[in-house]
Image (cartoon, grey):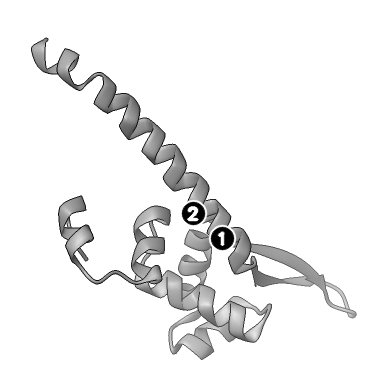
Amino acid sequence: MASSIPEMLRAECKCEDMAKCVLGLKELDINTYKTLLEHGAMTAERLGELLGRERSTAYRSLQNLIAAGLVYRETKSISIGGYYYEYVAIEPTVVKEMIRKTIDQWYQKMNDLIENFDKELIV
């Protein structure tokens, strides 16, 4: 992935690249999200199987996605007692708005910094 904005502007970027950059995700996180979208709600164990990874690796990726707001977990009851968690991906249209909002906030922050650029250089 590009390391500067000019590099990013010259490079061939995909939506996944932009999502990783804006939301701070890794390749595995993107694959985890896509798997949940494709297959629906599931446990971390099942997700690990589909990803070809250990359950603990799938769980760490799920935690990253929960922190980014792309996944939530639901508690499911077991009829004989107990419970388990299923993880659900939020709709891509919601993610798109999250990304748009984050980029807008970043743009405003950068714009504010630009306004003070000459003043800060003289200090």
Q: Quadrant of the C terminus?
A: top left
Q: Quadrant of the N terminus?
A: bottom left
Q: Nearer the viewer, residue 40 or 22?
A: 22
Snapshot quadrant of residue 14: bottom left
Q: Looking at the image, is 6 positioned above or below residue 48?
A: above
Q: Residue at x 15, y 59 (%)?
A: 7
Please tell me how crowded label 1 is: few (under 14), some (14-19), or many (20+) other residues with Cα within 10 Å: some
Residue to which mark 1 is pinned: 95
Q: Position of residue 62 (x, y in %)?
A: 53, 67
Q: Amino acid at mark 2?
A: Ile
- Residue 99 is tagged as 2
Can the viewer see residue 96 in this picture? yes
Q: Position of residue 55 (x, y in %)?
A: 50, 79
Q: Amino acid at mark 1?
A: Val
Q: Secondary structure at mark 1?
A: helix
Q: Is residue 115 left or right of residue 108?
A: left
Can the viewer see residue 4 in this picture? no
Q: Residue at x 49, y 54 (%)?
A: 99
Q: Looking at the image, is 108 positioned above or below residue 86?
A: above
Does the CB distance between marks 1 and 2 fall below 8 Å? yes
Q: Is residue 82 left or right of residue 28?
A: right
Q: Position of residue 80 (x, y in %)?
A: 89, 80
The image shows a total of numbered marks equal to 2
Please tell me how crowded label 2 is: few (under 14), some (14-19), or many (20+) other residues with Cα within 10 Å: some
Q: Secondary structure at mark 2?
A: helix
Q: Residue at x 47, y 86 (%)?
A: 51
Q: Residue at x 54, y 60 (%)?
A: 96
- Gap in Å between the C-alphas at discs 1 and 2? 6 Å
Q: Position of residue 60 (x, y in %)?
A: 46, 66
Residue ranking furthest to the right = 79
